[in-house]
Image (cartoon, rainbow, N blue to C red):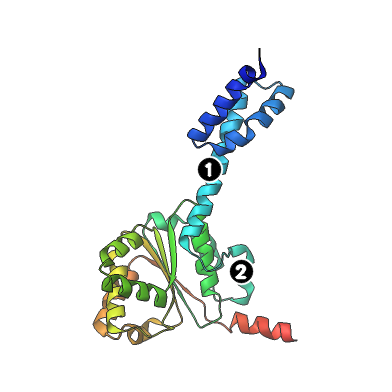
Amino acid sequence: MSATTADTPQVLLEHQLKALRLPTMLREYDKLARTCAQEKSTFPQYLLRLTELELLDRDRRATERRIRQAKFPVVKSLDSFDFLAIPALNKTLVLELARSEYLDRKENILLLGNSGTGKTHIALALGLAACQRGHRVRFLTAAALVGELIEARDEKYLRRFQKQLAAHELLIIDELGYVPLSKTGAELLFETISQRYERASTLITSNLPFDEWTEIFGSERLTGALLDRITHHVHIMEMNADSYRLKQSRRKRA
């Protein structure tokens, strides 16, 4: 038998694994076959291990893709958050929310507190946890979201953009209240959040208490309607403390 004939099954197998988009099986089948032969594993045991490798790698790639699509400015986890620095924060609730079960119930999260207390860190960590559990997430600052909404309206693709946002099971709106909104921007943001009411979860971070949200939206009627929707099914966490970033800076200088 010629070498070309002997190699044909392997060439065909690799071609078919590529066609079936099974890159991990393509990469590992030969090495795993030798390992299983040494261990005297049965063929079903070999096939089971090979398919397990493919599924594990597929899950990893899917998680990485969801994290990229979320467009986090940085990737942060709860492991790197200093809960002792923010004693007002309910750690038990945060860890419970990291299981992402609230997304199935279409519940919202509000993180309220002064600047530098880790609201964005918690938001990023909960977003990362949701991605790792198979959920679609999108992260934007309030200013960036309003800017994109206004651009979408002006360029006549607002409905398409709002439909894209609605497809995400978790929409994270960071830094609400840091930048004043125009009347148009406030109305578009209200519409976007309202469309998610009891359909998908929204996480908002803000440095302002509820009684000052009128300053953001410029209308008591609009603010009241928004709060009525956003707080219907909600987890509220207050994170008022001395600025964590400021304390870290002082430690470094010391």
| Vertical placement of residue 97 versus 90, above or below | above
Seen at 61% across and 17% down, the residue is 5
Residue displayed at 41% across by 57% down:
103
x%, y% of residue 211?
36, 85
The circle on residue 58 is 1
Q: Position of residue 239 (x, y in %)?
A: 52, 77
Q: Amino acid at mark 1?
A: Arg
Q: Residue flagged by tag 2: what amino acid is it? A: Phe
Instruction: State whether residue 186 is above or below residue 47.
Output: below
Can see residue 99?
no
Residue that label 2 marks? 81
* The quadrant where residue 186 appears: bottom left
Where disc 1 sits, the SS reads helix
Give the alpha-carbon distance from disc 1 to disc 2, as whole Å.
29 Å
Disc number lying in front (1 or 2)? 1
Residue nearer the viewer, 87 or 22: 22
Viewer-proximal residue, 177 or 159? 159
Query: Residue 165: x, y in percent?
Result: 35, 62
Q: Residues within 10 Å of mark 2 (few under 14, many from 20)?
A: some
